[in-house]
Image: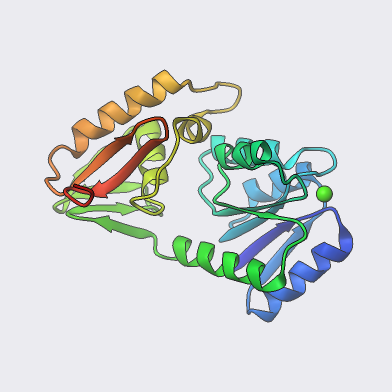
Amino acid sequence: MRVLIVEDDAPLRGGLQSVLELAGHRTATCADGLQASHLLESEPFDLVVLDLGLPRRDGLDVLRRWRARGGTTPVLVLSARDQTTQKVQGLDAGADDYLNKPFERTEFEARVRALLRRGQSPMQRIGCLSWDAAQRRLTINGEDVPLTRNESVVLEALMRPPGQIVSKAQLAARCSADHIAVSDNEVEVYVYRLRRKLAIAPDARIKTVRGLGYCLMAAGADE
Ligand code: CA
């Protein structure tokens, strides 16, 4: 697997690189946010380890821009900012997981393994619904179901993994394109349209979790 490490603290960056390479991964490293954005746009990665406090471009900004461009690579955020609001901001900006500094090596390794496992299978299935993340293609009972860009962004977020609650703010951050922010109301419209398209799947549905967001689940799984 190919991992991008974005960290301006040189000893920590080197340490993370050794840990990942010992685990058999290939790595690329950079020490500032602007370079991170360039690398993400020009090379494929299976995982990004992203510090938040970075020179030239803040890590949250890197993450928001990457998700806004439709980037789906799993992102593990590292931060010394341990307040809950910062964590929420990171998750809302599209982080898949979050580690507060300082952290144990074993915990870092476990989070990396979990994120890489999650990203490994490009084909996600729930009931008769299949989502091919690599081709961004939805099939229900083997039939192609065309989706708009934002519908596919919403479905992609709900599929990683199915059953996990995704907030409206997270979906809005993922749907937002360069300089065009998507509102919560627009997210509701995308979810509404996606539900109509999923209605032909008898065994999967998007559930609204009041005050928290949405999750995709097998029909009857929660009742
Ligand atoms: Ca830093």
Direction from residue 161 to residue 15 in the image, left or right = right
Q: In the displayed image of the protein, which residue is found farthest to the right?
A: 10
Judge by depth and name the residue closer to the eye, 125 or 147.
Answer: 125
Q: Position of residue 63 (x, y in %)?
A: 64, 41
Q: Which part of the image, by quadrant, shows the N terminus?
A: bottom right
Q: Where is residue 173 in the image (x, y as percent from the top left)?
A: 53, 32
Which residue: 50% across, 30% down?
A: 169
- With respect to residue 57, does 139 lie above or below? below
Which residue: 26% across, 28% down?
A: 193
- With respect to residue 55, does 13 lie above or below? below
- How are the residues colored? rainbow
* Quarter of the rendering containing residue 85: top right
Which residue: 27% across, 57% down?
A: 125
Direction from residue 133 to residue 145 in the image, left or right = left
Direction from residue 42 to residue 195 in the image, left or right = left
Q: Where is residue 28 in the image (x, y as percent from the top left)?
A: 72, 63
Which residue: 35% across, 34% down?
A: 151
* Quarter of the rendering containing residue 14: bottom right
Total marks in image: 0
- With respect to residue 172, does 114 lie above or below? below
Q: Where is residue 119 in the image (x, y as percent from the top left)?
A: 47, 61
* Quarter of the rendering containing residue 103: bottom right
Judge by depth and name the residue closer to the eye, 127 or 97.
Answer: 97
Direction from residue 86 to residue 45 in the image, left or right = left
